[in-house]
């Protein structure tokens, strides 16, 4: 049977392709062509667009780990510049251009791209939507006709499905968004400075969260205690388990084949420098 390790492996393989929408110049240019200005207005508009023209409170709640004031600098202001339908169109325009440059024109029209899109569509159609707003919003979008864009959209649905489950695993343990970042930094997955800058938390909020984790016995200074390390491992294990359903629908053989198809794509994205090291997403190297 497909195991939670499969869910983690396919996330690690597919996340850099999805993340072109955050890190590729073409995606920023496509958003800026609509009138949006600045990385974060682009980020929030494109990622939140499947939810509709929601306010800062909804974006903060569904994204989970951003400082509320940080979100409020962009939302709902972005909806006065671009409506969600135009944002959805812009993100596909940007991804299309980015994929053609980074992965290559040859791959865009290849049988491998078509096969990957077909497999990913099966998995994305199997996401369990209850309690997963970002996954549900993306699952409700039509798949583009071009295989490379259909693959991107399905990967986006699947990664938001995983993220929604991750939020549930954190919430169950009473771990706040900033607290999750403190634990991630203590685990060595990414740097405190990057997380604070990329998620909008100030020193006071970070230190308050760290103090709460010390009081719970999960942190000693800036290091995880044995109990803290166990909690981090449990959150990741639950995240993998909660992400498993779509991959079980695909089955072991097709999951293995999909990993073969995604491997070269991931390598192309990394080689092009469009997947920054120590970025705040935290996806592991699949090895």
Image: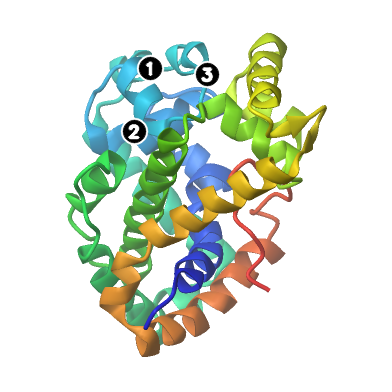
Looking at the image, residue 150 lies above or below residue 28: below
Looking at the image, residue 87 lies above or below residue 214: below
Q: Which residue is mark 2?
A: 48
| Marked residue nearer the N-terminal end (1 or 2) | 2
CB under 8 Å between discs 2 and 3: no
CB under 8 Å between discs 1 and 2: yes
- Looking at the image, can residue 61 be seen? yes
User: How many neighbours does mark 1 have within 10 angstroms: few (below 14), some (14-19), or many (20 or more)?
Assistant: many
Residue at disc 1, secondary structure: loop
Q: Is residue 274 left or right of residue 62?
A: right
| Marked residue nearer the N-terminal end (3 or 1) | 3
Looking at the image, residue 234 lies above or below residue 75: below
Q: Determine the image quadrant of residue 13.
A: bottom right
User: How many neighbours does mark 2 have within 10 angstroms: few (below 14), some (14-19), or many (20 or more)?
Assistant: many
Q: Which residue is mark 3?
A: 67
Q: Determine the image quadrant of residue 34.
A: top left
Q: Is residue 61 left or right of residue 221?
A: left
Image quarter of the N terminus = bottom left
Residue at disc 3, secondary structure: loop
Question: Residue 264: where, in percent of width, then height?
Answer: 58, 78
Question: Residue 3: where, in percent of width, then height?
Answer: 43, 75
Q: Residue at x 22, y 46 (%)?
A: 136
Circle on res. 155: none
Q: Residue at x 29, y 17 (%)?
A: 55
């Amino acid at each position: 049977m497909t195991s939670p390790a499969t869910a983690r492996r396919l996330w690690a393989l597919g996340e850099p392709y999805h993340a072109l929408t955050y890190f590729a110049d073409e995606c920023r240019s496509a958003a800026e062509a609509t009138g949006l200005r600045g990385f974060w207005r682009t980020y929030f508009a494109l990622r939140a667009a499947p939810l509709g023209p929601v306010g800062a409170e909804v974006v903060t709640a569904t994204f989970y780990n951003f400082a509320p004031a940080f979100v409020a600098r962009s939302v709902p202001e972005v909806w006065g510049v671009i409506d969600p339908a135009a944002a959805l169109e812009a993100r596909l325009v940007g991804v299309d251009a980015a994929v053609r440059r980074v992965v290559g024109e040859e791959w865009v029209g290849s049988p491998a791209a078509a096969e990957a899109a077909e497999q990913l569509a099966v998995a994305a159609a199997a996401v369990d939507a209850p309690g997963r707003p970002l996954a549900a919003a993306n699952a409700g979008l039509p798949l583009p006709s071009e295989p490379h864009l259909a693959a991107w959209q399905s990967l986006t649905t699947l990664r938001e499905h995983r993220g929604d489950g991750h939020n549930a695993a954190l919430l169950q343990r009473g771990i706040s968004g900033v607290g999750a970042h403190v634990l991630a930094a203590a685990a060595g997955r990414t740097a405190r400075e990057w997380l604070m800058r990329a998620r909008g938390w100030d020193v006071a909020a970070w230190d308050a969260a760290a103090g709460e984790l010390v009081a719970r016995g999960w942190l000693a200074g800036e290091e995880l205690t044995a109990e803290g390390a166990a909690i981090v491992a449990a959150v990741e294990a639950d995240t993998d388990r909660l992400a498993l359903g779509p991959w079980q629908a695909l089955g072991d053989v097709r999951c293995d084949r999909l990993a073969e198809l995604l491997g070269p794509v991931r390598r192309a994205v990394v080689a092009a420098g469009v997947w920054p090291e120590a970025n705040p997403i935290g996806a592991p190297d699949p090895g």
